[in-house]
Image (cartoon, coloured by chain):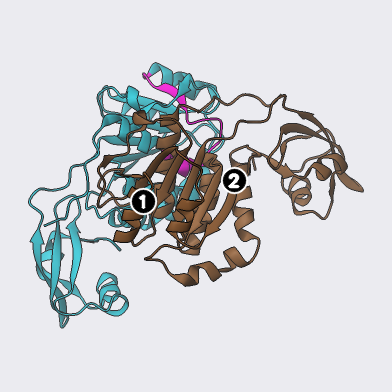
Chain colours: A brown, B cyan
Amino acid sequence: MNLMLLTADEARDGLATTDARARHLLKTVHAGIGSTVHVGVRGGRRGIATVLTTEPRLTFGIRWEAEPQAPLPLEVLVGLPRPQSARKVLHDLASLGARRIRFFKPAKGDPAYATSSLWTTDEWREQVEKGTEQACSALVPEVVHSPSLAAALEALPKGGWRVALDPYEAEGPLVPSKGAGGPALLAIGPERGWDAAERDALRAAGFSLRHVGDRVLRVEAACLAGGALMLAGLGCWKAHRPLV
Amino acid sequence: MNLMLLTADEARDGLATTDARARHLLKTVHAGIGSTVHVGVRGGRRGIATVLTTEPRLTFGIRWEAEPQAPLPLEVLVGLPRPQSARKVLHDLASLGARRIRFFKPAKGDPAYATSSLWTTDEWREQVEKGTEQACSALVPEVVHSPSLAAALEALPKGGWRVALDPYEAEGPLVPSKGAGGPALLAIGPERGWDAAERDALRAAGFSLRHVGDRVLRVEAACLAGGALMLAGLGCWKAHRPLV
């Protein structure tokens, strides 16, 4: 764990020793009084926490970073994939720093995917939080669902650099140096691909159909490759700095 | 399965009905006489196979593509990660189309990773083959091991575009438009990062230390993001075409 997400209350009052994060720190990492750990408040600042007490609660003294980390201008639309893929999409796009992940029900999708325990329990939230913690970030992506691609397109912010990955009807490769202004809006189809009406809707909404070569990537790999190419094209990557 | 890898003998003589691939086609996909499936001979041509017989052997008539798919000029050096990560690295770099994956024992690594059943059995080979089949490709990456980063650097082809991902001491972002000539040589450190001697060795070997923003990616995500950026920079991505 590169960072531990906390609520503002937990940052102030500490954690019960029965909390899973506290148990991890005390039993697995063998943290004690004076140990330090990176922490962050969801959507807010990060800091370096020093353990002050381990009983009756695990409490911290926290030196906060001066400025919160900058969010990245990337929203990814994803045709709802099988739960095993969706878990990786959630984790890996959170690590990459996507601001929003918007799932839609694709024409060539399986309605049963939406009833998975991934979505009916809080497991989806655990996945984006784990991915955010892996990235040493506190900016957890917003995760939203749209009933169809048309509804997802309606809900997008205006303008932006709009790219849909499509190995079959692409106009050309996704070229990162051709990035116009942000935000980057990336659309990734389902495993079975876009159907004709979806391609028409994407083009009508100003999306350029692009490929990443003639290899067919899994949904989660396409999210990472496409997202990295668009963020690189926008030139918005800052170097890592020590928190405080 | 987007493509089924075969040997040249299997392409000619077919598969025993007890073969796992034959069972998958007959029992799961419910293929019958006249069904078609994409096939490829490891390292060679792909084609569209039509089932001719299902008993006593599963045999095919194959229309081969006119030209074999072009290999991509990407070699990735990876600090040997935990087996769970190595499986994804093997699969996903095969899907991306890396020509070679070279694992080395990193300074901050765990020697036990090398003794995993992933490496002592043929499981590593299954992972690269699955990744290649996912990509609808027959060009299975070569997988090699070096005892150290120094040995891995010695074994590289001369020249090329040399980039090591490093969130901590990067000179700047990995910018795909700055690609010189290939081949792309990408070095990915272990989970715990490069040590000082490894950074010196990379710089001495002409590697530029670059970042992909201030988010810390898992090894397997860094392989995909870095590999995609370098392939895009080389401008070597061709569009997908129907095989025949």
Closer to the camera: disc 1 or disc 2? 1
Q: Is residue A138 left or right of residue A215?
A: right
- Image vertical order of residue B18 relative to residue A49, above or below: below
N-terminal label among 1 and 2 = 2
Q: Nearer the viewer, residue B145 or B95?
A: B95
The residue shown at (45%, 34%) is A231
Give the residue type that dot 1 points to.
Leu
Q: Nearer the viewer, residue A147 or B124?
A: A147
Q: Which residue is mark 1?
A: A202
The residue shown at (73%, 49%) is A24
- Residue A148 appears at what percent x and percent y? 46, 61
- Residue B44 appears at what percent x and percent y? 15, 51
Q: CA distance from mark 1 to mark 2?
A: 23 Å
A96 drawn magenta:
no
Label 2 sits on a secondary structure element that is loop
Q: Which residue is mark 2?
A: A141
- Give the magenta-colored segment's residue range: B205-225
Disc 1 with disc 2 on a shared chain:
yes
Name the chain under label 1. Answer: A
- Residue B232 appears at what percent x and percent y? 31, 34
